[in-house]
Image (cartoon, grey):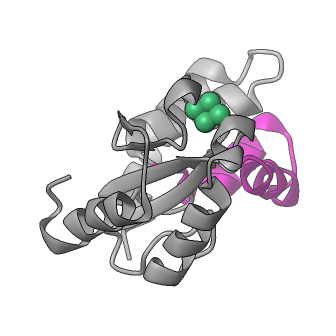
Amino acid sequence: MPDDSLHLPFVHDVLEREKATPGALLPVLHAIQDGVGYVPDAAVPEIAHALNLSVAEVRGVISFYHDFRTAPPARHTLRLCRAESCQSMGAEHLAAQLREQLSLDDHGTSADGQIALRPVYCLGACACSPALELDGRVHARLTPERLRELVNGCLEDGAC
Ligand code: FES
């Protein structure tokens, strides 16, 4: 478990810079996640106080947007495309395979922090569906076997 309080000086700098901006909550959350890698729990009351919001309001926004993380990011992020073209080429079957292989839901992160799953809606590779993005690199014309190889590569040594 990370010591969230270590990040508070950075959080205070962001709040000092952004708090007067209209609609500051989203820019503040993005700036903190960009700088720290996630939005630390210890930052939530600080944000609420600085922006004159309730803690529940801040937590509500963080949980509403799946892009905000409340824990350090996984070593690998696998974003399987779930949009139409990929769906028509078997993406739902691949998603089920991922859920079963990793025992995670579509937005899950493995307990060891090795891999995180995130759905995405079109990677611009529709002509080569189904597709996914792994650590920023697109892999297309996926098969169940290729998907399993990619995941195993992440789980084994982190070299994807
Ligand atoms: S629909 Fe999957 S890449 Fe476009």
Residue 137 lies in the magenta stretch = no
Ligand 1 sits in quadrant = top right
Dominant secondary structure of the residues highlighted in magenta in the image:
helix
Residue 68 visible here: no
Q: Is residue 62 above or below residue 11?
A: below
Q: Is residue 13 above or below residue 114?
A: above
Query: Which picture quadrant has residue 158?
Result: bottom left
Query: Which picture quadrant has residue 150?
Result: bottom left
Task: Say which of 145 and 61 sits in front.
Answer: 145
> Where residue 53 appears, x then y in whole percent?
86, 45
Q: At 33% from the left edge and 78% from the top edge, which residue is drawn?
A: 112
Task: Say which of 114 and 95 sits in front.
Answer: 95
Q: At 74% from the left edge and 46% from the top edge, which residue is drawn?
A: 65
> Where residue 146 appears, x then y in whole percent?
33, 58
Residue 116 visible here: yes
Task: Say which of 81 and 118 sits in front.
Answer: 81
User: What is the quadrant of the N terminus in the image?
Assistant: bottom left
Question: Could you tell whether 143 is left or right of 27 in the image?
Answer: left
> Where residue 17 appears, x then y in whole percent?
57, 19
Q: Is residue 28 above or below residue 151?
A: above
Magenta residues, start to end? 38-65
Residue 51 lies in the magenta stretch = yes
Question: Could you tell whether 153 is left or right of 81 in the image?
Answer: left
Q: Count the marks: how many?
A: 0
> Where residue 153 appears, x then y in whole percent?
20, 64
Q: Is residue 135 above or below residue 102?
A: above
Question: Could you tell whether 59 is left or right of 96 in the image?
Answer: right
In the image, farthest residue toward the top: 21
Task: Say which of 24 and 67 sits in front.
Answer: 67
Question: Could you tell whether 124 is left or right of 56 in the image?
Answer: left
Query: Which picture quadrant has residue 101?
Result: bottom left
